[in-house]
Image: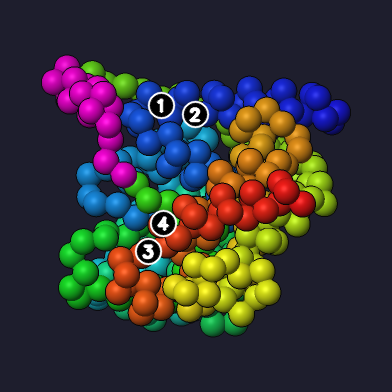
Amino acid sequence: MLPETALQLASTQLTKVRNEIGKIIVGQQDVVDGVLICLLADGHVLLEGVPGLGKTTLLRTLSRVLHLKYSRIQFTPDLMPGDIVGSAMMDTTDGGGKALRFQPGPIFANLVLADEINRATPKTQSALLEAMQEHTVTSGTQTHILEAPFLVMATQNPIEMEGTYPLPEAQLDRFLMKILVKYPSRADLSTIVERTIQQNQIHVEPVLDHGEIMQLREICDQVLVAPHVQSHAIDLVMATQPDSPQAHELTKKYIRFGSSPRGAQALVECGRVHALFHGRLHLSIEDIDAIAPAVLRHRIILNFDAHADGQNTETILATLIPSVTATAARA
């Protein structure tokens, strides 16, 4: 496919998808785009926000618009790994004998909502994260492959932390993005209330099918990455590492551990999709900067001084990212 044709096709399809989702999801465009970016970049996304902001509705709507299989797993302290991936069951054969048969769990879907993932025990969390990383599930001696596209959207509630099991940093690193879901604006909230009063039934139509989604992924792989843009992504990651020669001053003061190499990979992959969203087949520094907070915020571990001085990852990244970009512009 010619680059111009691929770009026009991708732009048209992505616009249709975003418009169709917009029929149900009011505002939250950054969240919608972030989830779509993770889907097309073959990654997973962690959403953090208080209840009632439409996180569950978003993924359910996305499954309708993209005509993909959707499943929801409500994480609780008593949830077991087998409840997610499935388990072997004793079954009766046609000859009257007994045999083990694998019963697939809810992980066998294209879009999986892991609701309140931090409420489950580490053992159960690891079962989900293994499937996310390997895209396979092993039961006994059999390995079952999860169908592509495969996206896990995990949610965390920033309040009610009692009785929860926060995800370890090594497991957080396996999420391509961590997106903060904020409260809607007054105008968006007014629209939501009006729809509630009118009780209008809004129906969304499928826009893409499985084949077209995989084709979009191939177009994303065609987005060009210039050497200076690749260097910028690497500079951003190294600026978060306190032992690096390129460490930012805030990094040396407040960051205990910085981003892993996965952060640099995620910046480029997510940036490519972001460029496609804006009608370009080349990655720019602006694309990297736009998605950098969502890519890096869960890959940084702060030290005690940061908490004592009232700093958090958002305030540090708000200073660090423009500083690295300004340094690149002067070079």
Kindly indicate the quadrant of the structure image that contains residue 25: top left
Q: Is residue 134 visible?
A: no
Magenta: main secondary structure equals helix
Q: What's the amino acid at mark 4? A: Glu
SS assignment at label 2: helix
The residue beneath circle 1 is 22
Task: Quadrant for the N terminus, please.
Answer: top right
Is 322 one of the magenta-colored residues? no
What separation in Å lies between label 2 and label 4 (alpha carbons)? 27 Å
16, above or below 65, in the image: above
What residue is rendered at 56% in x and 44% in y?
290
**x%, y% of residue 250?**
49, 67
Front residue (pair 2, 136):
2
What separation in Å lies between label 1 and label 4 (alpha carbons)? 27 Å
What residue is rendered at 67% in x and 35% in y?
276
**x%, y% of residue 89?**
41, 75
- Tally the numbered discs: 4
What separation in Å lies between label 3 and label 1 (alpha carbons)? 32 Å
What residue is rendered at 82% in x and 51% in y?
227
**First-in-chain label (3 vs 1):** 1
Marks 1 and 2 close (CB-CB < 8 Å): yes
Left or right: residue 228 compared with residue 271: right
Marks 3 and 1 close (CB-CB < 8 Å): no
Q: Is residue 110 visible?
A: yes
Q: Which residues are magenta?
A: 182-199
SS assignment at label 3: loop
What separation in Å lies between label 3 and label 4 (alpha carbons)? 5 Å
Is 183 one of the magenta-colored residues? yes
User: Which one is closest to the eye, mark 2 or mark 4?
Assistant: 4
